Image: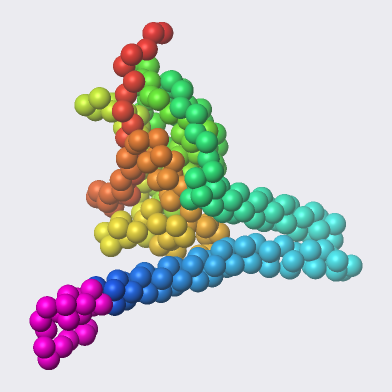
Amino acid sequence: MLTSAYPVGKTEELINIMNDVIEDYRKRHRRLRKVNQSYRESITSISHDIRTPLTSIKGYVQMQKNADISQEKKAEYLRIVERRLIELGDILNQLFEYARLEAGEFQLSPQRLNIGNVFAEIVSMFYEDFTSKGVEPQIEIPRESMFIQADKHAISRILENLIKNALVHGEGNYRFSLTSCEGYVVITIANETEQIEEKDLQQIFERFYTTDQSRNRRTTGLGLAIAKEFTEQMGGSIEAFLRQRCFVVEVRFRLAFDFVE
């Protein structure tokens, strides 16, 4: 900070202006350093998430070339390669979708939706995934119709990402519910977990954030970030809680009452 032995008149005014300019420059410099650090971390995360399935694919393709292995083993390796390619496709699709969201390139088309129908459709898509784990989620959908103004693709992606997050990271007691409260639709996705602590809740919706520090579960950490972006772009709200060992995500949208069935 600049000072003067004779801070009077125009000299004092000039010094104050220059100090303001210097402080502004320092703030901009700190912000730029923070952005650059975030950018480097993002590149590292993306590289790791893409490299992991690619390394696995390369390894199994090389093993298939081994003339000494049986046809059964080769078929098994081929199935593993196919699964890894699907995982890689999911990662690239999420990265592309998030990039478009951040750039404001998604043109949402709100329409009157029966949220109960959309909720039931998306939950049913994952039902076999849960039963294959030996669990059956508790599902609560009211009989009465509830309508909201929203883009169907965006709502579907929100639900898919939240349920997939529960499927990948949850450890039991899966509960998916759709209720109404004080003029809002409330979507609740809950599951038991030992991975998440209170300190994680402040960052849980940030891009590339994952509580699996080893990143062994082959997720980008973008699912919840995408859900948050879509929710807020449609005027909704999304929050995460810990309640008795359960990780809970609540999404709220205002009910649309002026409808004719």
Front-most of residues 208 and 179: 208
Q: Which residue is drawn at 56% across and 64% down?
A: 46
Does residue 3 appear left or right of residue 62 in this picture? left
The image position of residue 68, as x and y in percent, is: 87, 68
Front-most of residues 186 and 165: 186
Q: Which residue is drawn at 43% across and 20% down?
A: 112
Does residue 61 appear left or right of residue 31 in this picture? right
Outermost residue, right side: 67
The image position of residue 5, as x and y in percent, is: 12, 91
Q: Can you say whether 133 is above or below 156 in the image?
A: below
Q: How many marks?
A: 0
Is residue 167 something one can see in this rendering?
no
The image position of residue 84, as x and y in percent, is: 67, 56
Q: Can you say whether 119 is above or below 196 in the image?
A: above
Q: Can you say whether 96 is above or below 40 in the image?
A: above
Q: Can you say whether 44 is above or below 92 in the image?
A: below
Is 17 in the magenta? yes
Q: Residue at x 25, y 25 (%)?
A: 183
Q: In which quarter of the image is the C terminus?
A: top left
Q: Residue at x 38, y 53 (%)?
A: 205
The part of the chain drawn in magenta is 1-19
Q: In which quarter of the image is the N terminus?
A: bottom left
Outermost residue, top side: 261
The image position of residue 207, as x and y in percent, is: 44, 57
Is 249 in the magenta? no
Outermost residue, front side: 10
Is residue 29 something one can see in this rendering?
yes
